[in-house]
Image: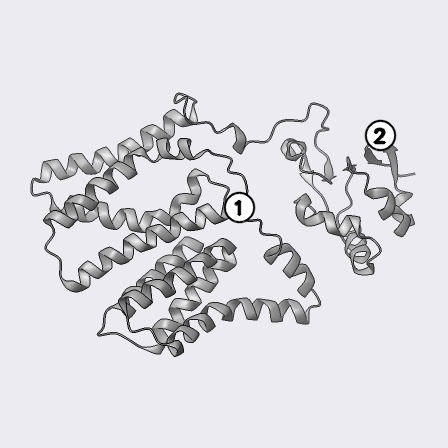
Amino acid sequence: MASTLLLLALNNLFKEVEFRVQRDDTLLLLGLYLGLASLFVLSYSVFLPGTVIILAVFTRLSIRKTLLLIFGFSLPHLLLMVAFYFNGNFEFLWSNFYEGTTWFVANPVSLRAMLYLSAIPIGYFLFSLVMVNREARLTKYQSQLLQIMFFWLLIAITEIGIRGKMAPHRVITYAPSLAYFISHYILLVRRKWLAEILLWGFAGGIVTIAYLARYDMINKIDYSKMFFSNVPSAPSNKRILVLDEQWGYFENNKLATGFYDWSVSEPYFRDVDYFQNVVLIDKAFSQDLPEMIIDPHQVMPNVFKRIPGLANRYSKQETTYVIKPAN
């Protein structure tokens, strides 16, 4: 969804660069699409300053137009904040969505593995970049679009570098730029049979490398860090709450209470002197009571002190709490 909205934003960026179309609603929609995309993936906010730079380079960007772009970007965020504020959940939104997004995190797939996976697109892109510059007879507007797509690719690379969590599916933001350059190159090929071979070689090469990587036939590509290790002592077919980052517990179980990401949930369970946190935990347990609580950090005793009725429903087994059978 976020990438689709980025395509709509890119379309409005093209309209703004084309001097014959410079209207306020174009900039407003451009900012709005970028803002909506960032609601799906917050790190896509990086495309806002990148777009401002592109507009500053290729158009007569005034302070008024910049503010209009920023307003369009901010509007969906402001509406979301207002909705949560009037429902009394503004702090929940801020801590879970805005503060809960981690930056510069470790990548589950190494840069070397990503380069091997992307060998075909990178090769085609570099060759296309050279050939389009040499052979294409572009107008001024087409030349500007060529440069914009190159800048867009740099912004997409920056987004992944800042956000982290590099993975094959995250390079979807590269697709518009790569498609632009590679399609231009293939259209320049005069022999139809050669163009067909290049196209099928591109598609087949990507599928082949992905298939070989999937079945561990390429030693340089390691997907192991994208999967969480199993927990031998984990139960089965239970509704559980895991107060840690041991995601392997969920392989054969279901999540209860909605507290999934420990980095987000930890402040609520540790700071039980804050009344709102106790209310939130009590409400979550009353709506979806877990059959088992995995508590390696021993945060539940303080929670039980604040909610005695909840403590009476569980029996402790080392660092695990198991719900008592109904009488």
Query: Can residue 325 be seen here?
Result: no
Residue 115: image tag: none
- Determine which quarter of the picture holds residue 151: bottom left
Residue reaching furthest to the left = 190
Instruction: Name the quadrant containing residue 283.
Output: bottom right
The vertical placement of 23 against 123, above or below, is below
Which percent across, then down, holds residue 296? 77, 35
Specify the quadrant of the image occupied by residue 124: top left
> Within 10 Å of the Cα at label 2, are there few (<14), some (14-19), or many (20+) other Cα atoms?
few
* Left or right of 81, for residue 216: left
The secondary element bearing badge 1 is classed as loop
The image's mark for residue 104 is 1
Q: Quadrant of the N terminus?
A: bottom left
Q: Secondary structure at mark 2?
A: loop
Badge 1 density bin: few <14, some 14–19, many ≥20, Cα 10 Å = few
Q: Which residue is mark 2?
A: 318
First in sequence: mark 1 vs mark 2: 1
Quarter holding the C terminus is: top right
